[in-house]
Image: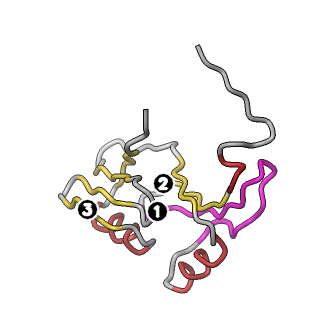
């Protein structure tokens, strides 16, 4: 099994799509109500769905990048604002936090080996 994509709701498709392209993602589907993006590395995609009615989203979307601090500096240079600069977390990840134009929380991070193999890893199966 492999995770194909995650779709997040947005209030303004044009603003949201422009924001994610500015982060460096490649837009591969463009409709008034749906947009899909390829990540610059790997095979992962994610999408946006227009939700102009009862908008709520508690999800957090994570994008991993080895050169996190450099990437954050580059994004700040083109006007992206951050809620938290890159910081080491107790769970062994380095994260920066920002929000897209719809208020969806995004974490840019680097976890290295700790992403899938933290010291507290367990393997539970049915």
Residue hosting label 1 = 100
- In front: mark 3 or mark 1? 3
Question: Magenta stretch containing residue 96, yes or no?
Answer: yes
Which stretch did the figure color magenta? 82-101
Q: In the image, is residue 98 part of the stretch drawn in magenta? A: yes
The Cα atoms of the two marked residues, 3 and 2, are separated by 21 Å
Residue drawn at (33%, 67%), measured in percent from left and top? 26
Closest to the observer, 114 or 60: 114
Residue that numbered label 2 is attached to: 104
The reply to whether callout 3 and callout 1 are in contact (CB within 8 Å) is no
Q: Secondary structure at mark 3?
A: strand
Cα distance between the residues tagged 3 and 1: 19 Å
Q: Position of residue 45 (x, y in %)?
A: 37, 53
Q: Coloured how?
A: secondary structure
Q: Element type at marker 1?
A: loop
Residue identified by numbered label 3: 28
């Amino acid at each position: 099994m492999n995770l194909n994509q995650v779709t997040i709701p947005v209030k303004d498709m044009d603003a949201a799509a422009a924001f994610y392209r500015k982060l460096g993602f490649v837009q591969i589907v463009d409709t008034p109500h749906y947009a899909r993006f390829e990540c610059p590395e790997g095979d992962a995609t994610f999408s946006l769905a227009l939700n102009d009615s009862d908008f709520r989203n508690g999800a957090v979307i994570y994008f991993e990048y080895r050169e996190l601090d450099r990437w954050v500096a580059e994004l700040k240079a083109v006007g992206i604002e951050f809620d938290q600069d890159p910081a080491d977390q107790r769970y062994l990840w380095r994260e920066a936090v920002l929000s897209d134009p719809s208020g969806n929380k995004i974490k840019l991070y680097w976890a290295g080996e700790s992403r899938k193999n933290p010291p507290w890893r367990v393997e539970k199966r049915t």
